[in-house]
Image: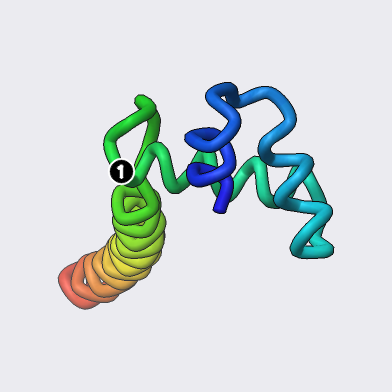
């Protein structure tokens, strides 16, 4: 609707506000949605929704791998200490 309003009016100024009032939603919410739609459509440079989703997935995977790595390091140190203790007996 915002794009249609811009096309009809021939200008961008006030289009988001007008459509937000018509829909009964917040102007800044609609403005953010329009901006993200433009990014996703390749009309504006930034991180697309798909890229953002992938970054979140990779960050979660990274945290899980770091945690697993710490557990393995701790277990390795524990078993190394156990083996060292057996040799001195």
Residue 45 vs residue 13: left or right? left
Residue 48 rendering spot, x and y as whole percentages: 35, 44
Q: Nearer the viewer, residue 9 or 50?
A: 9
User: Residue furthest toward the front?
Assistant: 8
Q: Residue at x 71, y 50 (%)?
A: 19
Q: Nearer the viewer, residue 7 or 41?
A: 7
Tell me the quadrant of the picture where the C terminus can be found: bottom left
Task: Write down the quadrant of residue 74 in the picture.
Answer: bottom left
* Residue 74 seen in render: no
Label 1: state its secondary structure: loop
Q: Residue at x 68, y 23 (%)?
A: 13
Residue at numbered disc 1: 41
Q: How many labels sit on residues?
A: 1
Q: Residue at x 60, y 25 (%)?
A: 12
Up the image or down, 79 lies above or below 56; here it is below
Residue 17 vs residue 6: left or right? right
Up the image or down, 39 lies above or below 89; here it is above
Q: Nearer the viewer, residue 74 or 9?
A: 9
Up the image or down, 25 lies above or below 3; here it is below
Residue 59 vs residue 85: left or right? right
Residue 57 rendering spot, x and y as whole percentages: 34, 62
Q: Residue at x 54, y 37 (%)?
A: 8
Up the image or down, 48 lies above or below 14; here it is below
Task: Write down the quadrant of residue 16 in the picture.
Answer: top right
Disc 1 crowd rating (10 Å Cα; few below 14, some 14-19, many 20+) is few
Residue 18 rendering spot, x and y as whole percentages: 76, 44
The scheme the figure's colours follow is rainbow
Residue 58 rendering spot, x and y as whole percentages: 30, 56
Q: Nearer the viewer, residue 51 or 21?
A: 21
* Residue 80 seen in render: yes
């Amino acid at each position: 609707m915002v794009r249609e309003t811009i096309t009809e009016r021939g200008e961008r100024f006030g289009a988001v506000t007008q459509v937000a009032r018509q829909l009964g939603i917040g102007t800044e919410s609609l403005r953010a949605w329009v901006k993200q739609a433009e990014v996703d459509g390749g009309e504006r440079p930034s991180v697309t929704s798909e890229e953002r989703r992938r970054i979140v997935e990779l960050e979660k995977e990274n945290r899980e791998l770091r945690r697993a790595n710490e557990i393995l390091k701790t277990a390795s140190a524990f078993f190394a200490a156990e083996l060292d203790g057996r040799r001195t007996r």
